[in-house]
Amino acid sequence: MNKIGKTAVVNEEECIGCSVCISVCPNDAITVDEMAHVDKAKCTGCGECIAICPVDAIKLQ
């Protein structure tokens, strides 16, 4: 359950598709093909992916 009302959003222009965000998401809410995609139904807004993204392509909105 998302208690803060925000989910992770990926900036398509900044994401390099490196996949490191997948390894830290406790809810399996992220998939990566050429770039990361967040499943808003699974994302709880914990921010783990934001902290690890090497190019700061993920924000909470």
Image (spheres, helix red, strand yellow):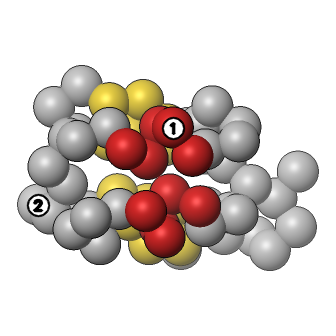
* Residue 57, visible in the rendered structure: no
- Label 1 and label 2: CA atoms lie apart by 21 Å
Residue 38 point in image, percent of width and height: 48, 43
Please tell me whether mark 2 sits on a helix, a strand or a loop.
loop
Residues 20 and 46: in front is 20
Q: Quadrant of residue 44?
A: bottom right
Q: Amino acid at mark 1?
A: Ser
At a point 16% along the width and 31% down the height, the residue shown is 34
Residue 9 point in image, percent of width and height: 43, 60
At a point 61% along the width and 44% down the height, the residue shown is 25
Residues 40 and 15: in front is 15
Q: Amino acid at mark 2?
A: Glu
Residue 10 point in image, percent of width and height: 34, 57
Residue 59 point in image, percent of width and height: 44, 72
Q: Label 2 neighbourhood size at 10 Å, few (<14), some (14-19), many (20+)? A: few
* Residue 51, visible in the rendered structure: yes
Q: Quadrant of residue 18?
A: top left
User: Quick one: which residue is furthest to the top in this view?
Assistant: 33
Q: Are marks 1 and 2 in contact (CB under 8 Å)?
A: no
Q: Label 1 neighbourhood size at 10 Å, few (<14), some (14-19), many (20+)? A: few
Q: Please state if 25 lies on the left or on the right of 12 as rendered.
A: right
Q: Quadrant of residue 32?
A: top left
At a point 51% along the width and 37% down the height, the residue shown is 23
- Residue at numbered disc 2: 13
- Residue at numbered disc 1: 23
Q: Is residue 32 above or below residue 16?
A: above
Residues 7 and 16: in front is 16
Q: Which mark is first along the chain, 2 or 1?
A: 2
